[in-house]
Image (cartoon, rainbow, N blue to C red):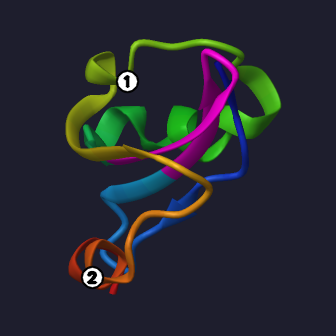
Amino acid sequence: MAYANPSQSPNGSVFLLFGRDNGRDAWYIIRAHKIKEPIVRNFHKTVESYNLNKLGTVLETGWGKEPPEDLKKKYMH
């Protein structure tokens, strides 16, 4: 799994990650533990594969290049 540059919510603790899982585009919305936020911000530079549960709480996941707009609004605004 490879990750692209994450998006961060205005409050700073929720991140939208993009990657590929088993050759398919995937996205993940996670609430990171405060101490792990720097790791998440730099995923696209340093991480090929990672257990996201070690970073915090996985809130939503799905297949495709982008999550549905309602989920983006719910978590990222």
- Residue at 55 percent across and 51 percent down: it is 64
- Residue at 42 percent across and 55 percent down: it is 15
Asked which quadrant contains residue 76, the reply is: bottom left
Percent x, y of residue 61: 32, 43
Residue 28 vertical placement versus 76 (above, below): above
The image's mark for residue 70 is 2
Kind of residue at badge 2: Asp
How many circles with numbers are drawn on the protein?
Answer: 2
Question: Position of 16 compared to 20: left or right?
Answer: left
Q: Residues within 10 Å of mark 2 (few under 14, many from 20)?
A: few
Magenta region includes residue 26: yes
Residue 61 vertical placement versus 71 (above, below): above
Q: Earlier in the sequence, mark 2 or mark 1?
A: 1
**Magenta segment range?**
17-29
The image's mark for residue 38 is none
- Residue at 21 percent across and 79 percent down: it is 74
Magenta region includes residue 49: no
